[in-house]
Image (cartoon, rainbow, N blue to C red):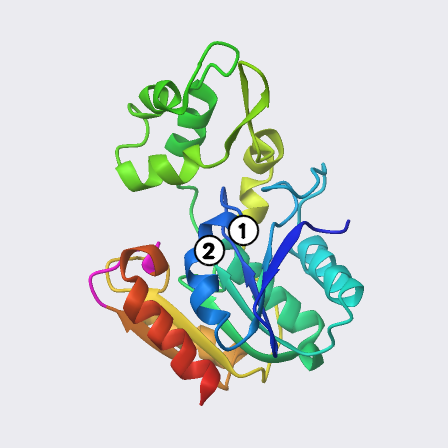
C-alpha cells in the first residue's frame, strides 16, 4: 500500500505519524514550524485520512507501509515522530529498520499493553446517522452523549467529509478500527534498540506512568523522557509552543 502524504519544507526528512482516529491534517500547524528546518512529510496511515482502507491492520503492516513510502520517495535516512498509535508504529519501524532512523520522537505512548478505553468514542461514532445528518454540527449532537470533551469531538469530526452532495462519510475505516482495537492496544514485543529517542508525555496523561519508564528505557537505552506540564494525551495540541520547542531542541542539538 502506498500511503497518502503531503510535504512542506526542505532539508533532512522529518516524518510525522498521527494517532488513532486522526490524520495528517491534525499536524499541519506543527509541520509548518518544523518545515523551517526540515523537509516535513505528513503521512496518513492505512484506514485513516486519504490513505487506502484494508482489512488487515497490524503495526508490522503499518511499518512496512511507511517503509514503502520512504523507498518511493528515495529516502534512506530520516527523523520519525509519532503520536499515540503513530508512536507505536514508529517504535515498530525502529525495531525493523533501525538503520534508517536518524532520531525518533514518541509522543505520549509506551510499549505496554493498554486496557480497552475507546468504547464510548466508538459508540459515539456509531451513533452518527450519516444517511440523515446534513452538517457537522448535527453530527456533533449525536456524539455529545458519548464524548463529553469538546476538543475530542472536534478532533473526530475532522474525519467527516462530503462523499457526495448531501451525504457525509467517515475518512477512517471504523469497522476495521473497532475490530482490531485489541491489536492497536497490544504491547510491543521488541528487542533492545539504540535509535536516539525522545519520549514526550503530558503531565495529566496516564499513557506513560513513572513506573513504565524502566521497561521503556530497557528497550530504548539511548532515550530520554520529557514531561510537559498542564497537558494530557493530546500534548501537542494542549501545549503547542512548549511541545514544538521540546521537539526542535532534541532534533537540532
Seen from the viewer's position, the closer of residues 51 and 202 is 51
Q: Is residue 231 magenta?
A: yes
Q: Position of residue 166 (x, y in %)?
A: 53, 13
Seen from the viewer's position, the closer of residues 195 and 150 is 150
Label 1: state its secondary structure.
helix
Residue for point 54% across, 41% down: 181
Residue 182 quadrant:
top right
Residue for point 62% across, 75% down: 191
**Going by the image, does 217 lie left or right of 228?**
right
Residue 207's disc number: none
Q: Position of residue 133 (x, y in %)?
A: 44, 14
Seen from the viewer's position, the closer of residues 159 and 33 is 33
- Residue position for label 1: 24
Q: Are marks 2 and 1 in contact (CB under 8 Å)?
A: yes
Residue for point 72% across, 38% down: 54
Residue 27's disc number: 2
- Which stretch appears magenta? 229-235
Viewer can see residue 236: yes
**Going by the image, does 134 lie left or right of 41?**
left
Q: Is residue 203 magenta?
A: no
* Mark 2 closeness class: few <14, some 14–19, many ≥20 residues within 10 Å: some
Q: Position of residue 141 (x, y in %)?
A: 32, 20
* Mark 1 closeness class: few <14, some 14–19, many ≥20 residues within 10 Å: many
Count the marks: 2
Label 2: state its secondary structure.
helix
Q: Quadrant of the C terminus?
A: bottom left
Q: Position of residue 244 (x, y in %)?
A: 37, 70
How far apart marks 2 and 1 lie (CA) works out to 6 Å
| View extreme (bottom): residue | 253
Viewer can see residue 212: no
**Going by the image, does 94 lie left or right of 32?**
right
87 vs 39: above or below: above
Amino acid at each position: 500500500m502506498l500511503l497518502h502524504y503531503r510535504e512542506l519544507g526542505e532539508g533532512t526528512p522529518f516524518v510525522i505519524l498521527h494517532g488513532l482516529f486522526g490524520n495528517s491534517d491534525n499536524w499541519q500547524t506543527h509541520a509548518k514550524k518544523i518545515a523551517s528546518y526540515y523537509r516535513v512529510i505528513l503521512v496518513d496511515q492505512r484506514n485513516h485520512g486519504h490513505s487506502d482502507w484494508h482489512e488487515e491492520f497490524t503495526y508490522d503492516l503499518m511499518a512496512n507501509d511507511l517503509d514503502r513510502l520512504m523507498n518511493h520517495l528515495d529516502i534512506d535516512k530520516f527523523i520519525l515522530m509519532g503520536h499515540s498509535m503513530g508512536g507505536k508504529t514508529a517504535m515498530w519501524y525502529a525495531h525493523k529498520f533501525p538503520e534508517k532512523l536518524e532520531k525518533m520522537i514518541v509522543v505520549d505512548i509506551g510499549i505496554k499493553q493498554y486496557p480497552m478505553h475507546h468504547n464510548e468514542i466508538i459508540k459515539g461514532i456509531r451513533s452518527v446517522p450519516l444517511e440523515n445528518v446534513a452538517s457537522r454540527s448535527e453530527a456533533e449532537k449525536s456524539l455529545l452523549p458519548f464524548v463529553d470533551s469538546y476538543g475530542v469531538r472536534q478532533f473526530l469530526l475532522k474525519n467527516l467529509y462530503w462523499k457526495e452532495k448531501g451525504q457525509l462519510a467517515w475518512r477512517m475505516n471504523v469497522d476495521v478500527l473497532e475490530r482490531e482495537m485489541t491489536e492497536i492496544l497490544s504491547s510491543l514485543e521488541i528487542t533492545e534498540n539504540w535509535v536516539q529517542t525522545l519520549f514526550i508525555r503530558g503531565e495529566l496523561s496516564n499513557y506513560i506512568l513513572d513506573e513504565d519508564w524502566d521497561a521503556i528505557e530497557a528497550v530504548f537505552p539511548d532515550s530520554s523522557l520529557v514531561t510537559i506540564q498542564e497537558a494530557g494525551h493530546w500534548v501537542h495540541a494542549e501545549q503547542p509552543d512548549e511541545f514544538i520547542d521540546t521537539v526542535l531542541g532534541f532534533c537540532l542539538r
